[in-house]
Image (spheres, rainbow, N blue to C red):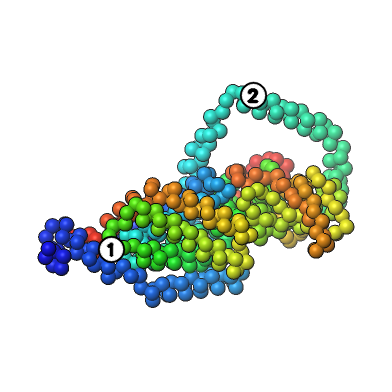
């Protein structure tokens, strides 16, 4: 069960990643695409247990850092998505999150994730000017929130079905 | 209500209750794991940042590239017919306009070519004198862009669907039919990662067409519009607007010489740096990259057709 869960989670990340680099650039605004990997991580953090979600966040981040065209210093997205998973897992209350709560979590997660990535870039001297950073962060949050109603419900259903704590059988 | 604290062995509803009451306990993400994962990330950053081009992360990049490259190529091939749909939906009028414009441009170019023969012959003689024979011919390996780096990552890179099997190696020049696109950063067997010249970290040696003055073309990495900075070495020279800048090219540098880069649109003189700064409009439209060519030494063996320097396919 655990192995199957890990496999399906890895598959979800791969699909999100491929769509993010190959499909969505065709609809991008100034090259800013929806961060599907971040959505997968948030969906997992809202559904499965926190430690697994954090490991998933780390793995998704490493994948974002290494899959080609990526050329930034590896580990920056890993750092950002680990924090995102941690925060999203904390935000969740012990009831099923409402639609509003999910959208709010995604917006906050997207803001925090993209900001951490941008800040590490500033520290390492890799990111551009600050006005550009703010613009990118704003549009990225908008994109992620726009895609939330389409992506998060099936993802959370998928992860919910896979979580042995919720499905005792 | 016994189900709340009981075993929950009857009916799905009770089990749910029990599961949710347990949620509270597992709701607190463990800080130890957070610290461990954050340290792992920081370690990764440190390794890659200080390693530079031979960092220990490069092999991992390559392995993941080998795995994901073919998937990216396949996905791009599936998506391509759909992204082409908007170009079918065009009115007769706009097509007629385009034909008229192209015919006008064509005839203009024809007249240019007719007068350029003499100049070109003379130029070829000079080139033949100054260049060694093996350096003259450059073949082109055609490739398509299959994946784009997002702006959230603040770097302008793309993946192309040709790699070391096609005869491509690091530091080769990538062009399309408009001009210079970038250079190859790293290759896997089936894909290569290309650094676009608009990236902040890209520096290209450039030469102003009219005066032959040399300078450096810096990418700006800016979002809104593709612009490049040209800084001339000799600060007494002021590049004229509409001047064309081509690559300067060195024997071991990554960029081949004579590839058109862009056109000067604005010139500023900076008092602090006491040099001239010009803004270039690149010839290549970086938001619509598709077919590109990688310049390889002539005679390279490749898994696909290679366009030789004289235009022949091989």
Residue receiving disc 2: B96
Residue at screen point 56% across, 65% down? A119
Placement of the N terminus of chain B among the 4 image quadrants: bottom left
Q: CA distance from mark 2 to mark 1?
A: 64 Å
Residue at screen point 80% across, 34% down? B113
Q: Nearer the viewer, residue B272 or B181?
A: B272
The image quarter in which residue A82 lies: bottom left
Q: Would you say A151 lies left or right of B121 here? A: left
Q: Nearer the viewer, mark 2 or mark 1?
A: 1
Residue at screen point 71% across, 52% down? B228
Q: Nearer the viewer, residue A102 or B161?
A: A102
Q: Which mark is residue B145?
A: none
Q: How many marks?
A: 2
Q: Would you say A166 lies left or right of A148 here? A: left
Residue at screen point 80% across, 64% down? B272
Rendering coords of residue B3 (x, y %): 13, 64
Rendering coords of residue A50 (x, y %): 34, 67
Q: Are marks 2 and 1 on the same chain?
A: no
Q: Is residue A133 in view from this perspective?
A: yes
The image quarter in which residue B277 lies: bottom right
Q: Nearer the viewer, residue B179 or B241?
A: B241
Question: What is the chain identity of the residue bearing mark 1?
Answer: A
How many residues crowd mark 2 within 10 Å: few (<14), some (14–19), many (20+)? few
Q: Is residue B59 in view from this perspective?
A: no
Residue receiving disc 1: A94
Circle 1 — which element? loop
Q: Nearer the viewer, residue A67 or A40?
A: A40
Question: What is the chain identity of the residue bearing mark 2?
Answer: B
Rendering coords of residue B279 (x, y %): 75, 51
Q: Say above or below: B87 vs A158.
A: above
Rendering coords of residue B275 (x, y %): 82, 60
Placement of the C terminus of chain B among the 4 image quadrants: top right
């Amino acid at each position: 069960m655990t192995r199957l869960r890990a496999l399906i989670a890895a598959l979800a990340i791969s699909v999100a990643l491929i769509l993010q680099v190959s499909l969505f650039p065709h609809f991008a605004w100034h090259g800013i695409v929806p961060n599907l990997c971040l959505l997968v991580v948030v969906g997992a953090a809202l559904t499965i247990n926190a430690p697994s979600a954090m490991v998933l966040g780390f793995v998704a981040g490493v994948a974002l850092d290494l899959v080609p065209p990526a050329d930034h210093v590896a580990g920056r997205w890993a750092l950002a998505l680990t924090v995102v998973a941690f925060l999203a897992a904390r935000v969740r209350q012990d009831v099923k999150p409402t639609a509003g709560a999910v959208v709010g979590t995604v917006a906050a997660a997207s803001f925090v994730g993209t900001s951490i990535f941008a800040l590490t870039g500033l520290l390492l001297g890799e990111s551009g000017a600050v006005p550009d950073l703010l613009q990118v962060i704003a549009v990225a949050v908008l994109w992620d929130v726009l895609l939330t109603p389409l992506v998060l419900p099936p993802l959370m259903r998928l992860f919910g079905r896979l979580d042995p704590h919720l499905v005792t059988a | 209500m016994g189900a709340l604290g009981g075993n929950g062995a009857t009916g799905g509803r009770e089990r749910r209750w029990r599961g949710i009451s347990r949620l509270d306990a597992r709701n607190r993400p463990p800080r130890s794991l957070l610290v461990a994962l954050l340290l792992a990330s920081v370690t990764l950053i440190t390794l890659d940042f200080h390693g530079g081009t031979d960092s220990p992360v490069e092999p991992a990049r390559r392995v993941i590239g080998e795995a994901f490259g073919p998937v990216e190529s396949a996905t791009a091939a599936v998506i391509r017919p759909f992204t082409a749909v908007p170009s079918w939906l065009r009115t007769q009028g706009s097509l007629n306009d385009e034909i008229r414009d192209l015919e006008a441009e064509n005839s203009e170019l024809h007249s240019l070519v007719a007068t350029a023969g003499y100049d070109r012959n003379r130029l070829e003689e000079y080139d033949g004198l100054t260049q060694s024979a093996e350096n003259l011919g450059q073949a082109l390996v055609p490739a398509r862009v299959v994946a784009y780096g997002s702006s959230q990552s603040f770097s302008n890179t793309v993946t192309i669907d040709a790699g070391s099997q096609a005869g491509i190696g690091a530091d080769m020049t990538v062009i399309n039919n408009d001009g210079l696109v970038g250079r190859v950063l790293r290759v896997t067997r089936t894909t290569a990662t290309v650094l676009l010249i608009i990236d902040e970290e890209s520096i290209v040696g450039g030469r102003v067409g009219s005066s032959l003055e040399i300078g450096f073309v810096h990418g700006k990495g800016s979002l809104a519009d593709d612009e490049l900075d040209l800084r001339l070495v000799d600060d007494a020279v002021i590049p004229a607007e509409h001047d064309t800048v081509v690559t300067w090219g060195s024997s071991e540098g990554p960029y081949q010489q004579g590839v058109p880069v862009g056109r000067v649109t604005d010139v500023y003189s900076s008092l602090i740096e006491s040099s001239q700064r010009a803004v270039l409009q690149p010839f290549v439209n970086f938001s619509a990259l598709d077919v590109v060519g990688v310049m390889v030494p002539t005679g390279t063996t490749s898994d696909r057709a290679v366009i030789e320097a004289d235009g022949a396919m091989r």
